[in-house]
Amino acid sequence: MITIDLNILQKKELRVAKIETYFQNDIDYWMSPDYSYLVDNALIYSILPSKVVDNSSSSNTLISNYINMEKVSLLMKDSSEGDSQKETMIDFILSWTLRRSVQQYSEENPVLYQYCRKILGKLIGIEMTDDVQVASVETWKQWKYIDLWANIRITCNGKEEFHAVLIENKAYTQTHHNQLARYKVIFDQVCKEYMPDAKRHYILITALDEMPDMLTNECKENGYTPFCLGDLNDYEQQDSESDLFNEFWLRYW
């Protein structure tokens, strides 16, 4: 019999389950290459019952307990190996999320609207109070190889502000070929020439549960602000009106 206790960590680390395993039989057997991957899979799914008990020796029973959990994303998690083009998905969903924060969508799906506003506010460092309205958001994916570029116009206490945002996302990989510095030079050149009044933001987003020291240091060296996806959103929020938002932002993958 295997008993797995799952303790959900604090909000910032909700995407990770701290799992303590107790084996009443041969521990070497369960930690063999044929079965040890079950423990790794369990780490991915951080919303599970406080105890999952499998009274059989069948690995299929244990796997099905994980796969069928409500909080696992059907959009972002399947049987594919590796990141499975998740960075491309992140580009599309981030672009859509930011554009859904615009004031014109406030009554269409009010819960979704507020969630999207909060995410945008964290990226540009503004608390999204009632005095802040998002007038427009324009986004471009993969322009000059920059994952996402966003031009954002907001009004704050009646005063208009213009924000230009460079976003580099890394699903589970590291940067390469001096990406952050190169993209920043391109971004700055365009902003200086065409948008000199824009407040510039340089963002790196990772799908990892914790920001690796290497990425943290590279962001610091190049003037970027690092975020894990979990930093931008509260996984314990109620569902929005959008399945797309829920599957990406409120599920575990």
Image: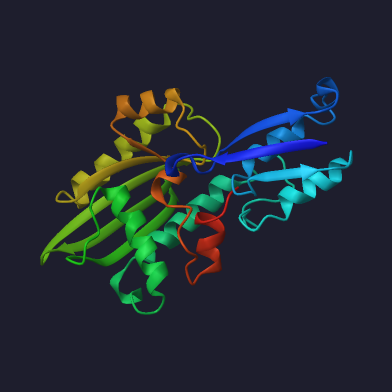
- Residue furthest bottom in the image: 107
Determine if residue 82 is in view: no
- Residue furthest top in the image: 28
Quadrant location of the N terminus in the rendered image: top right
Task: Tell me where residue 126 appears, x and y as whole percent.
Answer: 23, 52
Determine the image quadrant of residue 26: top right
Determine the image quadrant of residue 247: bottom right
Task: Tell me where residue 46 appears, x and y as whole percent.
Answer: 59, 44
Residue drawn at 47 percent across, 68 percent down: 240
Horizontal side of residue 147 vs 25, given as left or right: left
Determine if residue 61 is in view: yes
Task: Tell me where residue 175 appears, x and y as whole percent.
Answer: 47, 30
Horizontal side of residue 109 vs 89, given as left or right: left
Q: Please, is residue 115 above or below residue 67 in the view?
A: below
Residue drawn at 27 percent across, 51 percent down: 164
Give the number of marks: 0
Task: Tell me where residue 35 appears, x and y as whole percent.
Answer: 82, 31
Q: Please, is residue 210 above or below residue 121 in the view?
A: above
Looking at the image, which is closer to me, 229 or 214?
A: 229
Looking at the image, which is closer to me, 242 or 148?
A: 242
- Residue furthest right in the image: 57
Looking at the image, which is closer to me, 152 or 64?
A: 64
Residue drawn at 62 percent across, 53 percent down: 76
Horizontal side of residue 85 vs 178, given as left or right: right
